[in-house]
Image (cartoon, rainbow, N blue to C red):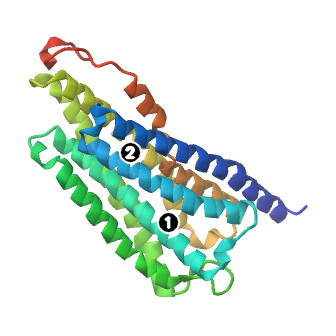
Amino acid sequence: MSTQDILIFATRQVHIYFGLAMTILGVTGGIFNIIIFTTLKTFRETTCAFYLTAVSVVNIIQLLIVLFVRVLSEGFSTDIRRTSWVCKIQIYMAVCCRMVSMTYVCLATIDQFLSMSHYRRFSNLRLAQRCIFITGIFWSLYGICFLIYYDASLGICAVINSNFGMFVTRFQYPILYGVLPLTTMTTFSVLAFYNARTLISRQINIIRLSRDRQLTVMTLVHVVFVVITTLPYIIYFIYSPEQIARNTLIYAILLLIFYLSFAQCQQWMNKRNTNQVVPNIETIDDIQLT
């Protein structure tokens, strides 16, 4: 067996075991998150939890449609993406779900920061619902260009316009997948965490404080996980787009790691937080926080 055959076999095994397991666990975790955020009164009344619920819904769609199709194609050699309309729909859903999910996470971090600042009035469900709707419409319209410029005319699902391919390489990946969302969510999650630490000096209801601190930690953990799983794939894609065809195994591993950011692995943090008991104390002055 040649080296190339070994790499092809290893790539298939990675997709089968890692990709399939990620799909199953990710969907399960997403459902778990939705149940928590929609049934517990502590979270149901917060806009940050509303955003995170929307993130979970989008991520489930991403895993079931985009990742599962890739697992079938690369792992089981059932490349349904050779069909033109399947190729277009898969690319469209991949772009829309990624952009919508990242935007919702950014909005969640911004909202969590606003909810613990002097601009708390901007953190409300009505505004969050409008932002969710507008974001979904915007990225759905943006994805239409991928329906136009991606096709499987040669039996491979790929971009068919060189200028658009340059746009994807130089703007879509480094800016829309990388710098813009990662900088936004990192900045506001850190600011929200800082605000949560400084709430000790204010007269705030302990139930609200406990809830805000839980949401802040959950959001920060989510952001850190997104950054860690996204950066390697983005850097590799930008640094050597021509090498991807030759380094199929490396690309597959980095891409699946990238999909981990949509697999809702923070579900265990959510489970731990829901098991915490909020003490029956009225104000922050009644307890000592570390």
Assess disc 1: are there few (<14), some (14-19) or many (≥20) residues with their C-alpha within 10 Å of its C-alpha: some
- Circle 1 — which element? helix
Q: Nearer the viewer, residue 59 or 289?
A: 59
Q: Residue 211 lies in what quarter of the image?
A: top left
- Circle 2 — which element? helix
Marks 2 and 1, the one that precedes in the sequence: 1
Residue where numbered disc 1 is placed: 94
Left or right? Give the position of 77 relative to 264. Answer: right
Q: Nearer the viewer, residue 187 or 72?
A: 72
* Residue 285 visible, this angle: yes
Left or right? Give the position of 79 relative to 116. Answer: right
Report x, y in % for residue 28: 54, 43
| Position of 146 relative to 244 (above/below) | below
- Discs 2, 1 touching: Cβ within 8 Å: no
Residue where numbered disc 2 is placed: 223
Q: Which mark is residue 286?
A: none
| Amino acid bearing label 2 | Val
Quadrant where the C terminus lies?
top left
Residue depicted at 47% across the width and 39% down the height: 32
* Residue 187 visible, this angle: no
| Position of 24 relative to 198 (above/below) | below
| Amino acid bearing label 1 | Ala
Q: Residue 120 lies in what quarter of the image?
A: top left
